[in-house]
Amino acid sequence: MKREDVETLLAEYDFEDFRWIAPEDIAIRQWVRFMCVESCPGYGKKAVCPPNVPAIEECERFFSEYNAAILIRFEMNAHHRDDDPEVFKDIDQRLLKLEERLFYEGHQKAIVFPATICYRCDDCPGRRDLCRHKESARPTPEALGVDLFETVKKVGYPLKIVKDMEETMNRYALLMVD
């Protein structure tokens, strides 16, 4: 499957704002994981959040096994954050359908990492082995140590910390393809 074919599928699933990136341009940093541990309210509570994800070194090896990646940008009002999962349900479902379609079209290694923490269960067991949605629950890029600030800057996308909940913010999903 050629790049143009992948781009046709992206458009079919209504993902128009994306950039191809080389996997080596994905910045994996220990400080990102440390921020999850020290400042994220989801730490230890979600099956797809640290400490339930591979070590940073394993994440680096994982990303190095790919030939291409796609950074998908979502622009939205800042008040649609992780505490408002309805905003992301449609996006996540389309991302998962795209991943599945890519798999059946010959990209067996296709996997997507969504733009928000998992929202599927209000009472998440907090362990991957007990997850009730293993087939669709995915860690965010940040949970895998991806420094989105550095990564998106490399491809010219904007990313800033918003202070006013009425500001527009950018969120990013990462689709790995082979």
Image (spheres, grey):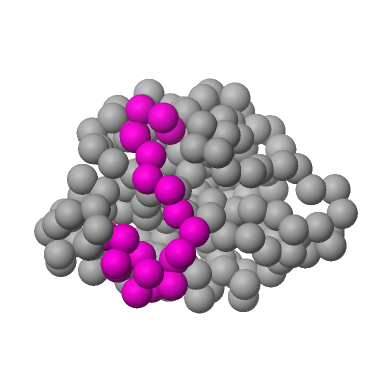
Whole-percent x and y of residue 16? 46, 64
Which residue is at 57% across, 60% downward?
A: 74
Which residue is at 51% across, 25% downward?
A: 29
- Residue 17 colored magenta? yes
Look at the image and tell me in which quarter the N terminus lies. bottom left
Q: Nearer the viewer, residue 6 or 178?
A: 6
Which residue is at 43% across, 33% downward?
A: 26
Q: Nearer the viewer, residue 40 or 102?
A: 102
Q: Quadrant of residue 13?
A: bottom left
Residue 121 visible within the image: no
On screen, residue 1 versus residue 155, left or right, reads: left
Whole-percent x and y of residue 138? 42, 55
Whole-percent x and y of residue 48? 47, 51
Which residue is at 74% across, 64% downward?
A: 77
Q: Which residues are magenta?
A: 6-26
Query: Taking 146 as reference, is 92 above or below it?
Result: below
